[in-house]
Amino acid sequence: MDTCTLVGGAVAAVAATLDETARQVLERLTVSAKAQVRQVLRARIVLAAADGLANAEIACELGIAVNTVRKWRGRFAHQGTDGLKDARRSGRPRIYDDRVRVAIVAAATSAPPHPAATWTHRAIAGRVADTVSAAVSPSHVGRILADLDLKPHKVRGWLTRRDTPDFWQRAEHICDLYRNPPQGAVLLSVDEKTAVAARSRKHPGRPATPGRAARQEFEYVRHGTASLVAALDVRTGEVLTEVITRNNAATFTGFLNRIDTLIPPGTDIHVVLDNGSSHTARHTQAWVKAHPRWTTHFTPPHASWLNQVELVFSALTRSVLRHGDFASRDDLIDKMDSYIINRNETAQPFRWTYDGTPLKEAA
């Protein structure tokens, strides 16, 4: 006689009933390649019990003790699928009391001692030892801070917006220009990109290979810098650039003069500018006053990102400048000019969707 048939018990087995949803969950668990072995075993016990098998039969089939079957069958009957999870354990007793945790948090959320600018785990452990006379290791400080999602070593920069009551009205006005350009007029976005470094690497880089990113030599040789001023036609997406040697009002109005000669007489010109010194100087204001067909629109302070030409500068940086290698200043200028020329051949206007309303406030 099979020895499995001799193992039984007089105690009646707890009934295990499954609805269709619970059955599907358990069946998926039994064939999952990522599930833990103990989870699969518990699911198989409940499925077998729901099919009407006795505890002894299930134990024989799965090669486990009857008490194991009885335990998980009973847990499921009383708690459902939640009963198949591991019970919570108390774990090792806490070494430090709440005073230590409070002292760690108090240190991490305060200013570090002179002359440090940020906290380290070791420094926090030292502060705790001084305040509550508890010897806490730096690694334990790190675990407590991680549990609280507190990261005193990380600093996120932000900018306090100037107190301008019409900030959002001005932002909305700029966005409305992009979304509804003036009929029959040219709408330009103008700004400078200054001090672009012409640098060549001391040794050639290595291209990317499967599983390995491209590599670039850290050391470089400086060959000077170059600056340019650019005007983006918001309607067409085309860009006009000019290399400049100085970033002042005289240079800026000289660029505006060049644009003025390129646009047919009688056409109104609207230009979006940020609050740079060359844009707000008296010399520039006088030039605009002397050219009635020009209308300037200034972005709010601390909102130069509303100047659409910044998108062109961002694309130029990603495509050419960030990882570029330039043998000379002329090489840098040539590559920037080539990028703009190639871009203009297939230029498309930016699809501006932001309407100038307040963005989600930072926490």
Image: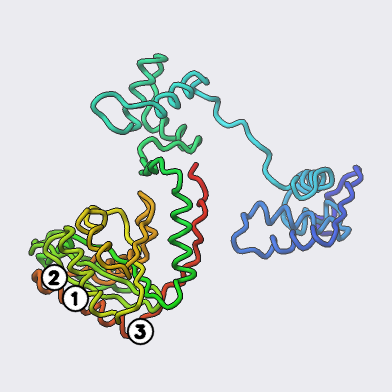
Q: Amino acid at mark 3?
A: Thr
Q: Which mark is residue 335?
A: 1
Secondary structure of the residue carrying numbered label 2: loop
Q: Name the residue nearer the viewer: 5 or 345.
A: 345
Q: Position of residue 29 (x, y in %)?
A: 69, 60
Q: Is residue 184 above or below residue 197?
A: below
Which of marks 2 and 1 precedes in the sequence? 2
What residue did someone put label 3 on?
346
Q: Amino acid at mark 1?
A: Lys
What residue did someone put label 2 on?
326
Among the 4 quarters of the image, the one containing residue 222? bottom left
Mark in front: 1 vs 2: 1
**186 left or right of 40 in image:** left
Q: Is residue 9 above or below residue 188?
A: above
Which of marks 3 and 1 precedes in the sequence? 1
**Are circles 1 and 3 on residues that touch, CB within 8 Å?**
no
- Distance in Å between CA atoms under marks 1 and 2: 9 Å
| Residue 343 seen in the figure | no
| Residue 45 seen in the figure | yes
The residue sitting at 38% across, 73% down in the picture is 234
Q: Position of residue 214 (x, y in %)?
A: 26, 69
Q: In the rendered view of the protein, which quadrant contains the N terminus?
A: bottom right
**Are circles 2 and 3 on residues that touch, CB within 8 Å?**
no
Q: Position of residue 316 (x, y in %)?
A: 28, 70
The residue sitting at 38% across, 42% down in the picture is 162
**Are circles 1 and 2 on residues that touch, CB within 8 Å?**
yes
Q: Amino acid at mark 2?
A: Phe
Q: Name the residue nearer the viewer: 92 or 355.
A: 355
Q: Name the residue nearer the viewer: 12 or 358.
A: 358
